[in-house]
Amino acid sequence: MKKSATLTIVLFILVSIFWAFVPKDAPTFTSASHASFSSWLLMRLDKGAYPAVNPAEAKAIVTQADMALIHSPATVPRATWIGHATMLVQYKGIHFLTDPHLTERPAPMDFLVPKRFTPPAISFDTMPKIDFIVISHNHYDHLDHRTVDRFGSSVTWYVPFGLKDWFLARGIETNKVVELNWWESHAFNAQVTVTFTPSVHWSKRTPWDTNDSHWGAWSVDVHGFNTWFGGDTAYDEPLFKEIGQRTGPYDMAFIPIGAYGPRSFMLKQHVDPAQAVRVHEDIRSKKSIPIHWGTFQLTHEPFLEPPKLLKAAMVKKGLPLQQFSPIKVGETVEGALLH
């Protein structure tokens, strides 16, 4: 096992031993997908180190972002994959981000986990002016405190119920944080509506805050261009069909396809590529972009396996590949390509 993985496990053990003797209140929310630390530890000890990542493979899925396009007026809908779960969506003067992670590691401290294998396609300093940001949940690969600090109160933050205080503690102005419960909506302005939809996941940022805040996905309608950002989720057919009925259909969806191995452990936490295709169908998405792969090595599937399995699942379903196929980190999809 690699030294970084061993160190991470040792630190978790020490924290867990300490925390076992601290009185705790019951979690605020109940999650069907939350796995215990002991089960995670047993899985890691059984599976060993994550598969090695070939630098050439990582380089092959990256392209240089078209910054001239990104900084031009978006007269047609435009979406750029910055990496992992971070999408930049632009349309008619509105620019928003999903779960922005613009730094090297998904951890509270830099020495705990390996660096990302593909860099953010757009840095904070070259980012266009952002109007608002949606946050799916508080896990470190989705809520990066260093990125949050850079944006600060310059944007409006849409966050799950129970997470607003975390943002306020970092000095963000209270009127810049909109906290929503599942199925609640908020009008950013007369042309933009943001709705928080459920997902099947959990929240935890420290040993003492398991499920103290919600987790979920975001439906964002900008001037009639309807998008859905899945964040992290396991599969639940009735839930996703309900989302499709209540807030769909969608012109574009950003659906996770990675961090699913081994299935014996990750089944109740993350969809695999075949399940992601079912999500695409259930929510009634016209065009979907796979996210949550090709950036961090978080679980035990090979680095480039997710897009291969996605293609196989689409072929098996008899669906046109252009409906749901990978793009490169840094690639922009716009205009007629969305339909």
Image: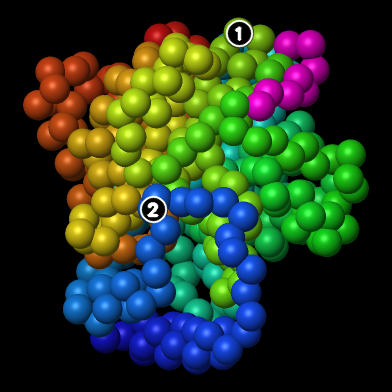
Q: Pick whichever, 189 or 25, lies toward us.
A: 25
Q: Is residue 70 left or right of residue 82?
A: right
In the picture as drawn, the residue positioned furthest to the left comes out as: 316
Q: Is residue 236 left or right of residue 178?
A: left
The range drawn in magenta is 184-191
* Image quadrant in which the N terminus is located: bottom left
Give the quarter of the image for residue 69. Answer: top right
**Does 135 sit above or below residue 93?**
below
Q: Is residue 186 magenta?
A: yes
Q: Pick whichever, 101 or 335, lies toward us.
A: 101
**Label 2 crowd bin: few (<14), some (14–19), many (20+), radius 10 Å:** some
Residue identifier under label 2: 33
Q: Is residue 104 visible?
A: no
Residue at 44% across / 32% down in the picture? Answer: 254
Q: Is residue 265 left or right of residue 7?
A: left
* Image quadrant in which the C terminus is located: top left
**Label 1 crowd bin: few (<14), some (14–19), many (20+), radius 10 Å:** few
Residue identifier under label 1: 224
Gap in angstroms between the C-alphas marked 1 and 2: 33 Å
Q: Pick whichever, 2 or 201, lies toward us.
A: 201
Q: Pick whichever, 314 or 150, lies toward us.
A: 314
Q: Nearer the viewer, mark 1 or mark 2?
A: 2
**Does 198 sit above or below residue 201?**
above
| Residue 180 percent location from the top left of the image | 69, 35
Q: Earlier in the sequence, mark 1 or mark 2?
A: 2
Residue type, numbered disc 2: Ser
Residue at 76% across / 20% down in the picture? Answer: 187
Q: Main secondary structure of the magenta part?
A: strand
